[in-house]
Image: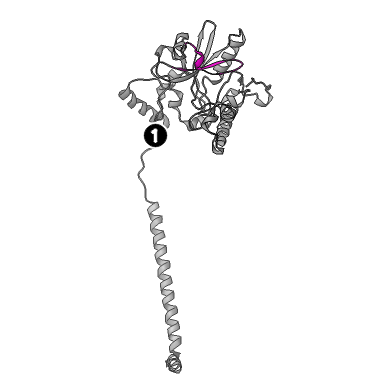
């Protein structure tokens, strides 16, 4: 059998044996297949390049100001004219990048707002219009007495060297924290002015928002957004232990949020703001454990030519 196969393969056809003809035929078939494959791949690439070079019709890119005005124009016809907060006007991304939009709210509402699928309503909507100031609301003593049940003891949620903080509810059902400064002549007005100047116009997701203030007689009060998840001290050592313990993920989230707030105050705005009273009880948290820095009673405003490194160390007990 083997000898017959060998005899067949060695049989000559002209100048070549049969096995040589078979090898040449297989090699030629391989070359043909390889050439066809290369040609097909080259053809596909050329089609793709031609497709990408075709002109694509694009809608004209409008400047942000034009888009904002057109959106505001439509919303004014459907919902009527309304005051907008700085949080509604400018996206959170802009605020985190350090863009600070201070000044009169009335002047800036003409520009319109960036709309999102879920727009958070202003906590000041529904309150008396005549009491609106550039960045917030001017509350009367009566407003805050009603909100805090006449500053009842059961409404106290914190106290410190400069005042007592009460939980309250405004007439529009917005929960707030009312900081009533102690009646210390001279020092009260100074602390009040510093805190209002420091954070009245500041908007950042990791800073407690100042909604307004009250100046009536000897009373000096600040009204903040209410944080419903306690502060870092309570979670680590105090009243929030019954709800569980902070996970490492939550702790890292609090650290990052606090760092972002300080970086924003120190570097992203002019004049710079130095808190000078950082402690765990001044780091509040919302339900998602997003940290918000509070209590700017010792804040110091810095000009562009000064550095926070040179400021004097200060603080309060607690």
Q: Residue at x 58, y 20 (%)?
A: 296
Query: Where does label 1 land, which residue?
Result: 62
Q: Position of residue 199 (x, y in %)?
A: 54, 21
Q: Is residue 113 above or below residue 179?
A: below
> Residue 246, located in which quarter of the rendered image?
top right
- Quarter that holds the C terminus: top right
Relative to 83, 94 lies left or right: right
Q: Is residue 213 above or below residue 117?
A: above
| Residue sitting nearer the eye, 8 or 104 | 8
Q: How is the image coloured?
A: one colour
Give the residue at the far top of this rendering. 217
> Residue 251, located in which quarter of the rendered image?
top right
Residue 27 among magenta residues:
no
- Quarter that holds the N terminus: bottom left
**Residue 268 seen by the camera:** no
| Residue sitting nearer the eye, 47 or 252 | 252
Residue 157 among magenta residues:
yes
Q: Position of residue 189 (x, y in %)?
A: 58, 10
Give the residue at the far front of this rendering. 242
Residue extent of the magenta highlight: 150-169
């Amino acid at each position: 059998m083997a000898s017959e196969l060998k005899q067949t393969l060695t049989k000559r056809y002209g100048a070549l044996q049969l096995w040589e003809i078979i090898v040449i035929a297989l090699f030629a078939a391989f070359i043909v297949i390889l050439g066809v494959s290369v040609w097909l791949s080259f053809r596909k690439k050329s089609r793709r390049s031609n497709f990408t070079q075709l002109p694509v019709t694009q809608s004209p890119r409008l400047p942000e100001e034009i888009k904002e005005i057109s959106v505001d124009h439509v919303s004014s016809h459907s919902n009527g004219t309304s005051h907008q907060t700085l949080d509604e006007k400018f996206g959170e991304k802009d605020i985190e990048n350090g863009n600070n939009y201070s000044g009169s709210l009335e002047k800036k509402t003409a520009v319109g707002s960036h709309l999102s699928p879920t727009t958070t309503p202003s906590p000041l909507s529904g309150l008396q219009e005549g009491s609106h100031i550039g960045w917030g609301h001017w509350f009367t003593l009566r407003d805050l007495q009603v909100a805090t049940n006449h500053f009842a003891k059961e409404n106290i949620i914190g106290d410190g060297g400069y005042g007592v903080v009460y939980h309250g509810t405004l007439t529009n059902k917005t929960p707030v924290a009312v900081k009533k400064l102690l009646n210390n002549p001279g020092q009260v007005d100074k602390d009040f002015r510093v805190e209002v100047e420091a954070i009245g116009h500041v908007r950042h997701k990791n800073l407690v928002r100042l909604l307004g203030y009250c100046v009536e007689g000897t009373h000096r009060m600040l009204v903040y957004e209410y944080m419903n998840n306690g502060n870092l001290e309570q979670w680590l050592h105090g009243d929030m232990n019954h709800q569980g313990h902070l996970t490492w993920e939550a702790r890292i989230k609090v650290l990052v949020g606090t760092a972002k707030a300080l970086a924003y105050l120190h570097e992203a705005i002019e004049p710079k703001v130095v808190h000078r009273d950082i402690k765990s009880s001044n780091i509040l948290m919302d339900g998602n454990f997003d940290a918000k820095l509070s209590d700017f009673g010792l804040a110091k405003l810095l000009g562009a030519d000064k550095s926070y490194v040179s400021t004097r160390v200060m603080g309060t007990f607690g």
